[in-house]
Amino acid sequence: MKLVFGLLIFLCQQGFAQQGYKPNDLVKNMYANKIINYSTASASLKDLQGNITIIDFFGTWCIPCIKALPELKMYKQKFKDDVNVILISSEKEAKLSSFINNRKPFDFPIIVDEDNLFTNAFAPPSYPYTIILDKNLKILSITNMADLTAEVLSKFVQDQKTTIESTKTIQTFDTIQKPTILMPAPILQENALLQLSQDFVYAAKTNEQVASYITKLKEVHYDSLLNNLRTDDDKKAFWINLYNAYTNTSLHQNPEKYKSRNKFFKAKNIHVAGKIFSLDKMEHGILRRSKIKWSLGYLNKLFPNKAEKQLRVAQLDNRIHFALNCGAKSCPPIAFYKSATINNQLDAATTVFLTSEVLFKKEKNEVEVPILLSWFRRDLGGRKKIISMLQSMKLVPENIHPKIKFKKYDWTLYLNNFKN
């Protein structure tokens, strides 16, 4: 698991990864009202901590989260009492309990963050999202499990052991606040239509029943669609969620459909507010503002229909390309997109995707990038803008003009989260 260390630290430094706690912040001694797979049903953060504490934001829908569990177990066994591991999830207790029961023995406590107290405080832009705390609840690092190594963790443990005694007097935990006075940070409320899209894509990703969501979307009045999706952020969140929900739903039902991907994306079988859509219509008509699919982004449709013009975004956002097509392996682990936080989420999705896919070869002065960047090269500003973007993300050295080599897209499916 040797990806670029400090991926999400980089995100924070760029100013878009999170708006919650940051490295070197002191974390409030929050109280978890509900904990499962632990000796007590509730506890404060300090009650759960070790000399070094790994907090991992976790989802049963998140393949990288699940794949990280054996490594977390290895770290706990290696460092014993020096390291404690806590998982945090905003999913329902029943979903988490079912997941644990299917994976017994399960090694870690899970804070059931249904009121989003911890989630709002840390504001993870995507999952997995890993916080390393010291004894004083100071954030040593924000990363993800793919980037955490035994060597890095060992250094944190050794540094903590040699910390001078006086640091223990820092008044980090003056008072443990009672659960009744702990309130989630205020967040913007999503309207009912956006909430429906979030619930639908979450159910699709966790392989739950989705028929009721499909029915509700079919029965939505068209005027409600127009009135509730007023801003580009609303439109992007809604249509990205629907695109990913229908992709997951269709492929759970019949994975063979992906063998004819062009037919799969062109099929007009999605009913929303009295209109019939295809995945291509959602992507190229609405989210790409009436682009012709195979024109690399250079050509627009001459005569888009009235509904497409009414529903489409006012301005194309090239980051959508790193949020769509999420039946495939090369996709960021974001449960669903929210209008209030979509810019942070899209920035995170872009950086997570490109950091894992881009390879600069100094000896050849060549950079390998996913073919996705070629398919939509005009959306991304052309080759020069692509290189500038990669340089701004420190994936290509500055003042270098490498050749671009496009890699084949990875369409590997992860259709059953619980078996991967």
Image (spheres, grey):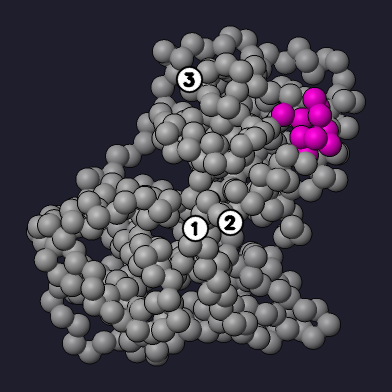
The vertical placement of 98 against 6, above or below, is above
The x and y percentages for residue 336 are: 40, 52
- Which residue is pictured at 73% across the width and 39% down the height? 73
Q: Amino acid at mark 3?
A: Asn
- Dot in front, 3 or 2: 2
Instruction: Name the side, left or right, on which 408 lies relative to 301.
Output: right
Badge 2: few (under 14), some or many (20 or more) residues near its Cα, within 10 Å? few
CA–CA distance in space, label 1 to label 3: 31 Å
**What SS does tag 1 mark?**
loop
CA–CA distance in space, label 2 to label 1: 7 Å
| Marks 2 and 1 close (CB-CB < 8 Å) | yes
CA–CA distance in space, label 3 to label 2: 30 Å
Comes first in the chain, label 3 or label 2: 3
Specify the segment rendered in magenta.
75-84
Comes first in the chain, label 1 or label 3: 3
> Could you say which is closer to the camera, residue 284 or residue 109?
109
Identify residue for label 1: 416
> Could you say which is closer to the camera, residue 144 or residue 186?
144
Q: Answer yes or no: is residue 33 visible.
A: yes
